Image (cartoon, grey):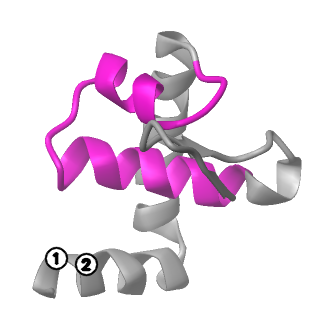
Amino acid sequence: MMIWEKGGIGIKARSRQLGYRAFSAYVLRVLCGLGYKEICGNIYNMTISGCARLCNRGYELVKNEERYLSLFEGLISA
């Protein structure tokens, strides 16, 4: 993960980090209330349609995988 001076988050598009990108996009969408355009501004190299796909994948991760669900619940309770 790279953090840039502009405040954006850059994550290289490696398949092993796809879950992290999807979870991050989903959290920004749901918990922070950001729109797709705002999320694209914060995550490096992201189109609006790609962001929508990542948010959907993030939802599936939270719904189906226990580790992402526990992370999400931890963020909600914080």
Q: How many residues crowd mark 1 within 10 Å: few (<14), some (14–19), many (20+)?
A: few
Question: Is residue 38 placed above or below 64 in the rendered structure?
Answer: above
Residue 72 location (% of width, % of height): 32, 74
**Residue 52 among magenta residues:** no
Q: Is residue 19 left or right of residue 43?
A: right
Judging depth in this view, the residue of 4 and 62 nearest the camera is: 4
The answer for how far apart the CA atoms under marks 2 and 1 are is: 4 Å
What's the magenta bit mostly, secondary-structure-wise?
helix
- In the foreground, 48 or 9: 9
Residue marked by disc 2: 75
Q: Secondary structure at mark 1?
A: helix
Image disc number at residue 76: 1
Q: Amino acid under label 2? A: Leu
| Residue drawn where x is 79% and y is 43% of the image | 12
> In which quadrant of the rendered image does the C terminus lie?
bottom left
For the point 34% across and 17% down, the residue is: 37
Rendering quarter of residue 35: top left
Check disc 1 and give the amino acid type: Ile
x and y percentages locating residue 57 in the rendered image: 54, 43
- Compared with 75, 5 (above or below) is above
Q: Which residues are magenta?
A: 18-46
What is the residue that sits farthest to the front in this orientation?
5
Q: Does residue 8 sit above or below 1 in this rendering?
A: above
Numbered disc 2: secondary structure: helix
Label 2: few (<14), some (14–19) or many (≥20) C-alpha neighbours in 10 Å: few
Where, quadrant-wise, is the N terminus in this rendering?
bottom right
